[in-house]
Image: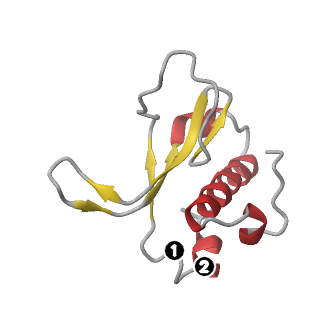
């Protein structure tokens, strides 16, 4: 993923155990009327665009690696050009990497703006 490459190169040792994946659509269980997203989810209103899944243990008892998941269709449907897609992906990735590292998004990208 081109948008992740500069971030991964900049923070190579800190992100060595972090995987990045793309899923077509979000598959998340939410309560009816859910309004507040946790920091590990980047959303546009009620629609999640990406999320950070922390390391854990799967159903068979095997350890899992932490990973960022980008939801392709919701992200693509909110962009109208290749440039706006790159910008949107960068915004999502910076926010989620910052959560993973427990730092401000400005630590990842000093030009980061909370306005996407």
- Asked which secondary structure carries label 2, the reply is loop
Total numbered badges shown on the rendered structure: 2
Q: Which residue is mark 2?
A: 11
Q: Mark 1: few, some, or many residues within 10 Å (few <14, many ≥20)?
A: some
Kindly give the residue lying farthest to the left in the view shown.
60
Mark 1 sits on what residue?
15
Query: Which residue: 63% across, 37% down?
Result: 43
In the rendered image, the quadrant that contains the N terminus is bottom right
Q: Residue 58: image x %, image y %?
A: 24, 51
- Percent of width and height locating residue 77: 63, 32
Query: Image check: 104 left or right of 24?
Result: right
Q: Residue at x 17, y 55 (%)?
A: 61
Q: Is residue 85 above or below residue 65?
A: above
Disc 1 secondary structure class: loop
State the image coordinates of residue 85 (x, y, percent, origin top left). Answer: 68, 48
What is the quadrant of the C terminus in the image? Answer: top right
Residue 27 lies in quadrant = top left
Residue 23 figure quarter: top left
Q: Residue at x 81, y 60 (%)?
A: 112
* Vertical order, 71 against 100 (above or below): above
Dividing the picture into quadrants, the one containing residue 86 is bottom right
Q: Choose between 51 and 101: the one closer to the eye.
A: 101
Question: Which numbered circle lies on residue 42?
Answer: none
Q: Is residue 78 above or below residue 99?
A: above
């Amino acid at each position: 993923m081109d948008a992740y490459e500069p971030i991964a190169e900049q923070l190579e040792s800190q992100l060595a155990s972090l995987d990045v994946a793309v899923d077509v659509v979000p598959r998340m269980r939410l309560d009816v009327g859910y309004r507040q997203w946790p920091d590990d989810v980047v959303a546009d209103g009620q629609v999640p665009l990406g999320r950070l899944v922390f390391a854990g243990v799967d159903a068979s008892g095997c350890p899992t690696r932490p990973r960022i998941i980008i939801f392709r269709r919701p992200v693509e449907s909110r962009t109208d050009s290749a440039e706006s897609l790159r910008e949107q992906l960068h915004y999502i990735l910076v926010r989620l990497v910052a959560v993973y590292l427990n730092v401000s998004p400005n630590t990842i990208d000093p030009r980061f703006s909370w306005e996407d």
